[in-house]
Amino acid sequence: MEKSLQQLLHETEQVALEAGAFLRKEQEGFSIDRVEEKHAHDYVSDVDKNTEQIVVGALKRILPEAGFVTEEGVASFQGEERYWVVDPLDGTTNFIHGHAPFAVSIALCRNQKIELGVVYDARTDELFSACAGGGATLNGQPIHVSGNPIHRALLGIELPYAADCYSDFGLTLLKQLYGFAGGIRMNGSAAVALCHVAAGRLDGWLEKYIGRYDYMAGAIIVEEAGGKVTDFAGRSDYTMGDNIVATNGVIQQQLLEQVWKAGVEKLPNVKKK
């Protein structure tokens, strides 16, 4: 008998809590010599890999038939109908510097539809969750996006690792949004930023050159909290791409227009590896 989404969500939450506790323990006395550079300014440590092993092992017990899309490659996707999308440590640069936030991000998909998402901010002990049609919660309490208009909006923006591709566009976009929106922040974790949109702490967030494991869980949490998620072109079928615009819905079109005005069509199609 197939498990219900609510049962799967509860079991996934427990996996995220276990992995987050491991991250907190590992950060105590963490040494920089445990860090490797995957690409320019893109880091990984043994903590990322060990946490992914914990998460993958637990998820295999929950849903043995499912495949995996993971950041560190501990498990693989072989065309399974259902599959987990896992980022064991979103915010690695924050983690290695003792800075917040950093989180565990887990999504379950069926083909290209996201069925559930869990993001656990290990520093704040905040568990964000959602499943399709079930609403979004923070530590078990319902959350909803804000209703702020653009002139009062607090936006989250990141400058991705692909600086050689993105810098001209990113700086142009920042210049356009400075003074256009109420404020701009960067937090270093896509998963947590998306959850802050869902909880009404941010009114919008965007980033390009990211992997599916960075945004899949957070995206369904935003949508189930009443928000809007598209790619940079404004399409709702964003799950196979490398770019996301997520908002309270009120400012979605205005934020997309600023992205287009900044010259998004000139960006090369370079995905985060």
Image (cartoon, rainbow, N blue to C red):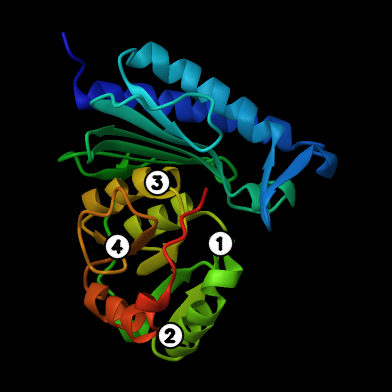
Are circles 4 and 1 on residues that touch, CB within 8 Å?
no
Residue type highlighted by circle 4: Asp
Furthest toward the top, the residue is: 1
The image position of residue 110, as x and y in percent, is: 22, 32
Identify the element where label 1 is drawn.
loop
Category of crowding for the residue at label 4, using alpha-carbon neighbours closer than 10 angstroms: few (below 14), some (14–19), many (at least 20): many
Q: CA distance from mark 4 to mark 2?
A: 18 Å
Identify the element where label 2 is drawn.
helix
Identify the element where label 4 is drawn.
loop
The mark lying in front, picked from 4 and 2, is 4
Residue at 52%, 72% (x, y): give it: 166
Residue topped by disc 2: 177
Residue topped by disc 4: 231
Residue topped by disc 1: 187
Residue type highlighted by circle 3: Arg
Identify the element where label 3 is drawn.
helix
Residue at 62%, 35% (x, y): give it: 48
Category of crowding for the residue at label 2, using alpha-carbon neighbours closer than 10 angstroms: few (below 14), some (14–19), many (at least 20): some
Residue type highlighted by circle 1: Asn
